[in-house]
């Protein structure tokens, strides 16, 4: 194997972790690697770090753009990429030294279009005691996991995998209109263009999680409804038979947003009053669909409570969340 792999690293104010990220890419056992850093208008020392690494390593390319968001940065990286295969790594994450060699190996072995590894929960990548397992999926099989049909696994991520370049047929593959949920749309586009996906159980991508439960509500969550409307539009345009799956997930997003508002106490904010009423009414319309779908019983109970009296239910959830944060 000597095919070129292009790894795209969008970076915005990433001075705290960018060095670790780039060091983990430089240390890859697969040597024919092109690392493309797209600086999305950082205002900290990210640019200085990038220039230092570019000067020291011939396989690192650097591009600066005014701040336009991660989707624009990734699209620019795809345009600059020369590799037959493409991967993405976030600037605050770290990858195992053997990740790209492993991803390319299983992708080639199973003649797949996309290969993926699991996410590590710590820096040590303690996966050596896990018996290696590789699972091959058809497009339809993998889409059922994407839509959480018979599975609760989240596979919206774009960064713990390797893609054949042919997946990226559009100039603007990542939808630049969204600042949240853009990975959901991109993952869907990729999967419906793949005939075969191979998944490895090896934990090789360290994703740096946020701080967990937050006391504030991000109004960007409302965009997730439009994200799933876009998924629906793609489904219709490609004449795919997944309308029911999309509808279930659109309904689940209503519940997710209302839950986030309850956890943060945002349901009490008057500026969200009209949106809250609309979301609850939409949830009521989809209640039967959700209760008959494959979701956890605890969520079905919450959905029922939200539909009976959302404000009362949200008040209880908000108090529980407050106690847990103390």
Image (tube, rainbow, N blue to C red):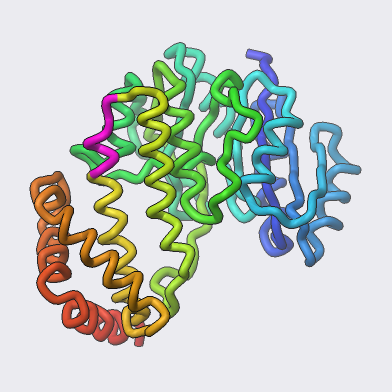
Bounds of the magenta segment: 241-247
- Residue 136: % across, % down: 34, 21
Q: Nearer the viewer, residue 216 or 282?
A: 282
- Residue 45: % across, % down: 81, 63
The residue furthest right is 55
Taking the spot 63% from the left edge, 50% from the top edge, the residue there is 70
Q: Nearer the viewer, residue 316 or 99?
A: 316
Q: Which of 232 and 316 is in front in this view?
A: 232
Q: Is residue 310 visible?
A: yes
- 42 lies left or right of 145: right
- Residue 98: % across, % down: 57, 33
- 35 lies left or right of 242: right
Q: In this picture, is 267 found above or below 279? A: below
Q: Which corner quadrant holds the N terminus?
A: top right
Taking the spot 58% from the left edge, 30% from the top edge, the residue there is 100
Q: Is residue 85 magenta?
A: no
């Amino acid at each position: 194997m000597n095919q070129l792999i292009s790894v795209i690293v969008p970076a915005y104010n990433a001075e705290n972790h960018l060095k670790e990220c780039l060091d983990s890419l430089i240390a890859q056992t697969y040597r024919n690697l092109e690392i493309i850093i797209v600086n999305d208008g950082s205002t900290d020392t990210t640019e200085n770090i990038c220039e230092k690494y570019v000067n020291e390593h011939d396989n690192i390319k650097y591009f600066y753009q005014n701040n336009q968001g991660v989707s624009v940065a990734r699209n620019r990286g795809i345009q600059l990429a020369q590799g037959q295969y493409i991967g993405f790594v976030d600037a605050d994450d770290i990858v195992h030294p053997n990740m790209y060699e492993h991803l390319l190996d299983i992708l080639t072995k199973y003649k797949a279009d996309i290969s993926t590894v699991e996410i590590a929960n710590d820096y040590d990548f303690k996966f050596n005691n896990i018996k290696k397992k590789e699972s091959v999926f058809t497009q339809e099989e993998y889409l059922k996991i994407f839509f959480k049909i018979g599975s609760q696994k989240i596979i919206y991520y774009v960064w713990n995998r390797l893609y054949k370049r042919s997946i990226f047929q559009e100039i603007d593959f990542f939808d630049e209109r969204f600042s949240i949920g853009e990975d959901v749309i991109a993952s869907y586009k990729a999967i419906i263009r793949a005939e075969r996906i191979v998944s490895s159980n090896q934990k090789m991508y360290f994703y740096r999680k946020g701080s967990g439960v937050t006391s504030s509500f991000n109004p960007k969550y409302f965009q997730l409804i439009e994200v799933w409307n876009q998924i629906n539009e793609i489904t219709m345009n490609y004449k795919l038979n997944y309308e029911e799956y999309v509808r279930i997930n659109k309904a689940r997003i209503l519940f997710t947003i209302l839950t986030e508002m309850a956890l943060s106490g945002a349901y009490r904010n008057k500026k969200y009053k009209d949106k809250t009423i609309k979301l609850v009414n939409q949830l009521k319309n989809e209640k039967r669909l959700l209760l008959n779908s494959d979701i956890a019983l605890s969520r079905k109970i919450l959905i029922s409570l939200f539909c009976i009296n959302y404000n009362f239910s949200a008040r209880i959830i908000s108090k529980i969340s407050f106690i847990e944060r103390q």
